[in-house]
Image: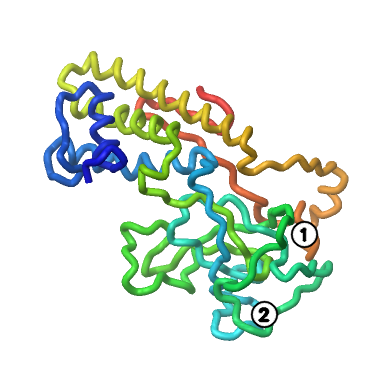
Amino acid sequence: MSGDLSPTAIGNQSLDAAGVNFTMGDIEEGSDQANVILRAYRQNLQQLLRACHWNFARAQRPLTLLADATGQTADVGTMVQVPWRFAYALPQDCAKMRFVVWNPLTGVQIPVGNITIPTTPQTTGQGQSPLTGARLTPARFLLGTDPNYPSAPGVAYDQVQGTSPAGSTVVMTNVEQAVGVFTANIIWPSLWDPLFRQALVAMIASNVVLRLQSDKKLGMALRREQIAIAKGAINAARVTDGNEAGFANTDHVPDWIRGRYAGGWSGANIYGGLGVLGYGYESVGFADGSGLSASAAF
């Protein structure tokens, strides 16, 4: 794939940014330059996807149920890490879980201290959707590795995040028929935001320039330049995400309400207790040892 909207094109842009006078015919062609780019490509792609809540990568999907700790759902396991009630499979294309939707798909609020177990197996919740027009409310959840639910045979463990023959990453929550909102692993450049493409090209270039640039003094200067470009693009994308309300929340929960629920979880408690209400974007590390936190560069 050598078109403008292909990994090969991204790799060649990175070579240009690194000042390397070489053009790949294909990112998997086996040349020294292509191999260096290929080794950096996926790692930088994954890191950048997790660095911002990119709107192009937002996915919302019912989660597949693995276990119900109450034992009242047929054809699923019962082993769930305490104190959670349900364990769901992490979507195989998930680069980063953002939040689990609290809104019951049936439209019925779960009473405090109680839970309604469905009479039919919860698999993917097909045929149901959150209330039309409802505001998506995050619920508490936690990611973890569970050895009770190894990945299915045939899964490429070296390619799919959160999978292994010894266990898999699960989403633990007390929400039935849970829907996940997450950053999907979008590998196709044709779907990327322009800022994402700019940042990825610069990140790859900054990581490979000293390996491929014969003039090391020039390589150091180019690395600093490309790191600055990547930081600027990520910061700009985070501002855009906020302006476009990728995940907006104007609710303010007073301390005294948070304190009321600090002792544990109850059916209507989305403020306190175990787990998180959502995962924000992550800090980013660069080749020169500097970084970009969730709020500012250093």
Looking at the image, residue 83 sits to the left or right of residue 17; the answer is right
The colour scheme is rainbow
Q: Give the image location of residue 232, x and y in percent.
A: 47, 24
The residue nearer to you, when weighing 202 against 240, is: 240
The residue nearer to you, when weighing 148 against 7, is: 7
Q: What residue type is labelled 2?
A: Thr
Residue visible at 53% across and 60% down in the picture: 144
Disc marking residue 70 = 2
Quadrant for residue 162, please give it.
bottom left
Q: Which amino acid does label 1 sit on?
A: Gly
- How many neighbours does mark 2 have within 10 angstroms: few (below 14), some (14-19), or many (20 or more)? few
Tell me if residue 74 comes above or below residue 271 in the rendering.
below
Q: Give the image location of residue 287, x and y in percent.
A: 35, 29
Residue visible at 63% across and 83% down in the picture: 120
Residue visible at 29% across and 39% down in the picture: 40
Q: Mark 1 points at which residue?
A: 264
Q: Give the image location of residue 230, x and y in percent.
A: 41, 27
Tell me if residue 199 comes above or below residue 135 in the rendering.
above
